[in-house]
Image (cartoon, rainbow, N blue to C red):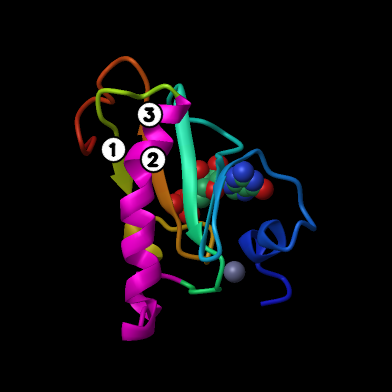
Amino acid sequence: MQDCLFCRIVRGEIPAAKVYEDDEVLAFKDIQPQRPVHVLVIPKKHVTSLAHATPEDVPTFGKMLLVANQIAVDQGSPDGFRSIINTGRVGGQEVMHVHMHIVGGQEPVGPMLKR
Ligand code: 5GP
Ligand code: ZN
């Protein structure tokens, strides 16, 4: 995906504060952090959203879940974190490349959904 923002970050065309990387997964700090710890974990391969996922994506998505806790601990959220994946219009997804938010810090992140 030539014009996808997160694909451009994967290719190094746009700078990002990377905190974790392996052959399948990249994690970097959110540019507008909502909590003291706010990291985005993405598959390096372009997948538009969870609505576009295929069985082929299962191992990479599993890896995203597996690395989440260590990223949170390393970034200063040792006692847990919240992971969020927004999907499509109803989910409020703004960047059309699957990403998992990891939010946390020293204090609880608060109620799960605001009305
Ligand atoms: P969404 O609403 O799609 O779940 O979340 C998109 C997230 O991407 C937002 O939290 C936003 O701050 C973050 N974001 C948007 N553009 C950039 C960027 O260029 N760099 C980084 N690091 N984060 C970005
Ligand atoms: Zn992409």
Q: Residue at x 47, y 27 (%)?
A: 75
Q: Could you tell me residue 68's position as x and y percent?
A: 36, 45
Name above or below for residue 114 compared with residue 48: above
Q: How far apart are marks 1 and 2 (CA)?
A: 6 Å
Query: Number of callouts in the render?
Result: 3
The answer to the question of whether label 1 and label 2 lie on touching residues, with beta carbons closer than 8 A, is yes
- Is 91 covered by the magenta stretch? no
Q: Residue at x 55, y 64 (%)?
A: 23
Q: Name the residue tied to disc 1.
A: 82
Q: How far apart are marks 1 and 3 (CA)?
A: 12 Å
Nearer the N terminus, badge 2 or badge 3? Answer: 3
Q: What stretch is highlighted in magenta?
A: 49-75
In the picture, the quarter occupied by the N terminus is bottom right
Q: Residue at x 65, y 68 (%)?
A: 4
Name above or below for residue 8 compared with residue 21: below
Q: How far apart are marks 2 and 3 (CA)?
A: 11 Å
The residue at the far top in this view is 106
Image disc number at residue 73: 3
- Hey, what amino acid is under mark 3? Val
Indicate left or right for 103 with 30 as reference: left
Nearer the N terminus, badge 1 or badge 2? Answer: 1
Q: Name the residue tied to disc 2.
A: 102
The residue at the far right in this view is 13
- Hey, what amino acid is under mark 1? Arg
